[in-house]
Image (cartoon, rainbow, N blue to C red):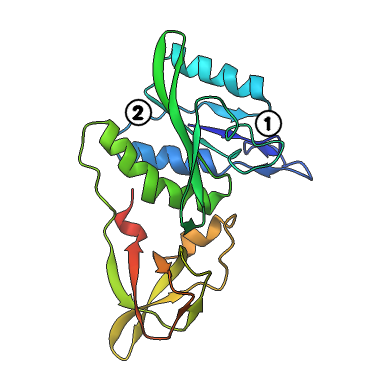
Amino acid sequence: MLSTGDELQDPAGAAASAGQFDGNRPTLCAALGRSGYDAVDLGIVRDDDEALLEALHGAARAQLDVVLSTGGVAQGDADIVRRFPALEYVPLALRPGRGVACGRIELEGHALWFIGMPGNAVAAYVIYQLVVAPLLARRAGARAESPVCLELPLAGAARTSAGRIDWRRGCFVARNGRAAVELLAQQGSSMLHTLSRADALVGIGPRPEIPDGEPVPVIPLAALP
């Protein structure tokens, strides 16, 4: 597991004025460990093609099976993962996240799989749980299962862009004596703290308008690693 970004640093000291602490590696390494994988923390890689290549050479020398990364999959000058040779960017009709970069890489006489996820914390978490975790299970020889998904009425109307599923954070509430789910007011894809306040991921879409009381897919966070 590695993170990319010149702005990132690990906790201990004070974050730079234009920087931020990396919450992705601790979050995803913990999820990997709970799923039974041997998670290796490869640290933070700066936004430099050679730095990423050096990290991957190290992963190959360590005989790792898969390298997961966060950040660098958009289309800016600093997006080193998306332009890495042998990787294909796969767009997804969901948010937060929108897509992954993935491919098979051979270095140091060793083949490994590389999966690049978005850099925003909630986007990385959602893409990991809904897309990457089933892929890892399949690569490990296990059954690739979708997360546990319930259907509950939505407490309050919601809107999104047509043609995609917007996985938002929500809380379980009681409505007319029955369980329902209410969306959190804050839904920014970089707001990692909202995952600690939420009970579930709530699927909004693919229709642009979801009326109050309509059943929606709900994935309890307690059912995720």
Q: Is residue 216 left or right of 138 when viewed as pictured?
A: right
Q: Any mark on residue 35, and which?
A: none
**What is the secondary structure assignment of the residue under circle 1?**
loop
How far, Cα to Cα, is label 1 from label 2?
26 Å
> Residue 90's spot in the image, x, y percent?
47, 43
> Residue 219's spot in the image, x, y percent?
33, 62
Q: Any mark on residue 38, and which?
A: 2
What residue is at 37 percent from the left and 38 percent from the top?
Answer: 32
Name the N-terminal-most of marks 1 and 2. 2
Residue lying at the far right of the rendered structure: 17
Height in image: 155 above or below 139?
A: below
Q: Estimate how packed mark 1 is, as few (under 14), some (14 to 19) or many (20 or more) residues with alpha carbons within 10 Å.
A: many
Quadrant of the image occupied by residue 151: bottom left
> Closer to the camera, 9 or 55?
55
Is residue 44 in view? yes
> Residue 209's spot in the image, x, y percent?
48, 79
Q: Give the residue type at disc 2.
A: Asp
What residue is at 65 percent from the left and 19 percent from the top?
Answer: 50
Q: Estimate how packed mark 2 is, as few (under 14), some (14 to 19) or many (20 or more) residues with alpha carbons within 10 Å.
A: few
What residue is at 26 percent from the left and 31 percent from the top?
Answer: 140
> Closer to the camera, 150 or 44?
150
> Closer to the camera, 222 or 112?
112
What residue is at 52 percent from the left and 26 percent from the top?
Answer: 42
